[in-house]
Image: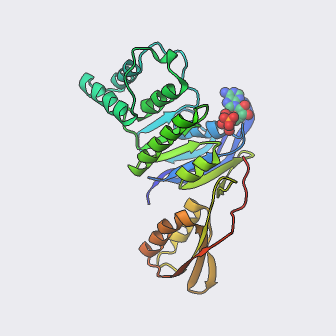
Amino acid sequence: MSILMQGKNMSKNINKKRILQNLNFTFYQQKTVAIIGANGSGKSTLLRILAGITLPSSGTIQRKHIRIGYVPEQFPPNIMFTGFNYLYHLGRIGGLSREVAKERVGQLFDQFNFTAQIEVIKYYSKGMRQKINIMQALLHQPALLILDEPLSGLDESVQLEVESMLYQLKQQGLTILFTCHDLPLVHRLADRTVTLQNGKLMESVITCDHVEESLVTIESTLPADVSILTQISAIYGIDHETIHKNKIQFTISSRQSDEIIALLIQSGASIYSVWSVQQKAFSMYEV
Ligand SMILES: Nc1ncnc2c1ncn2[C@@H]1O[C@H](COP(=O)(O)OP(=O)(O)OP(=O)(O)O)[C@@H](O)[C@H]1O
C-alpha cells in the first residue's frame, strides 16, 4: 500500500485563532477516507490544506506529485455559462485541446447521466449544480478527489445518484477524501474514518442507529514483516492484541476483514481462525 500524503505536526491558525493543532496523519493511495467532526471543527480548513489551496501555519505536509480534484462545499451560484461551456472552458484553461476538452466533457456527461442544457448554471437545480461541481473536479482525471460535504442540501434521489457515482469512482481506483455529516453514507463509502475534535485528528469507527455492524475476530501468527501491524493500526485505527509470543488477534468490522486478512497473509502471517462476534456494537460517536 503506497503512501499518498503525510502530515507531521501540522497546525493552522486563522486570525490568530488555532483551528488545527499538531495534526499527524498518513493517507494511502486508493483508500476512501471520511473526515468527520462537529460544525466548525476545521474539516473544510483541513481539506483546503490537503488540496493545496491553502498552506498550514506550521508543520509539514508531503504529498506525491499527483493531480488533485477539489469539490468545494459551496459552488459559485451565479455562473452564466451552460454546464457544457463552463466545463469546456475550464478544460481549455487547463491545457486541453478543443477536441479533447469536448470529448472529456462528453464522457463526464455520460458518466453522470447529465443531459446538456440550454440554460446557464445559475438556473440549474442544486443537484445539477453539484454534478457540475464534481465534474469540474474530475475534468483533468485526478488521482485524488477531495470533496467537502458532497451531499449537503441535495434531495434524497440526487444524494443516491451522487453516492453511487462516488462508489463507482472508488471502484475504479480513485483515492477519495471527503467530509460528511451523514454517518450511514460515511459507513457505506469510507474504508477509514478520522474525526476532528478540538483541533486534533483521531481515528474512529463509525456506528449509529441506522447502521448494523458485525464484528469479526481474526487470530493469526505474528507476521514475518511486523511493520504491517503499525500500518494496519494507522489505516484502520485498530491495534492487535498479543495472545502469546507468536499469536495475535484483531477484532474488527466485518467489512474490513478481507483486506486485513490479505495484508496479514502478504506479510507472512498464517491465519489460525476467523469468527464473527455477534450482537456487539462499536462505541457510539455523535457528530
Ligand atoms: N476565512 C476565515 N476567516 C475566519 N475564520 C475562519 C475562516 N475559515 C474558517 N474559519 C473558522 O475556522 C473554524 C473551522 O472552520 P471550518 O469551515 O474549517 O470548519 P468545518 O468543520 O468545515 O465546519 P462545517 O462543518 O460547519 O462546514 C471555524 O471556527 C471558522 O469560523
Across the whole image, how many numbered discs are drawn on residues? 0
Q: On screen, 206 above or below 132?
A: below
Q: Residue 37 is drawn in which quadrant?
A: top right
| Position of residue 100 in the picture relative to residue 132 (left or right) | left
- Can I make out residue 231 in this image? no
- Considering every residue shown, the one lying at the far front of the view is 157
Q: Nearer the viewer, residue 178 or 152?
A: 152
Residue 22 higher or lower than 245, as above or below:
above
The quarter of the image that holds ligand 1 is: top right
Front residue of 25/168: it is 168
Q: Position of residue 41 (x, y in %)?
A: 71, 41
Which sits in the foreground, 134 or 236? Answer: 134
Report x, y in % for residue 170.
Answer: 44, 49
- Quadrant of the image containing the N terminus: bottom left
The residue depicted at 58 percent of the width and 39 percent of the height is: 47
Residue that sits furthest to the bottom in the current view = 245
Identify which residue is drawn at 53% across, 64% down: 256
* Image vertical order of residue 266 relative to residue 152, above or below: below
| Left or right of 74 on screen, residue 174 | left
Estimate the x, y position of residue 253 in percent, counting from the top left: 59, 65
Q: How far from the left and from the top, in percent, is residue 20? A: 68, 42
| Residue 241 found in image quarter | bottom right
Tell me how the rendering is colored. Answer: rainbow
Rendered view: 237 above or below 127: below
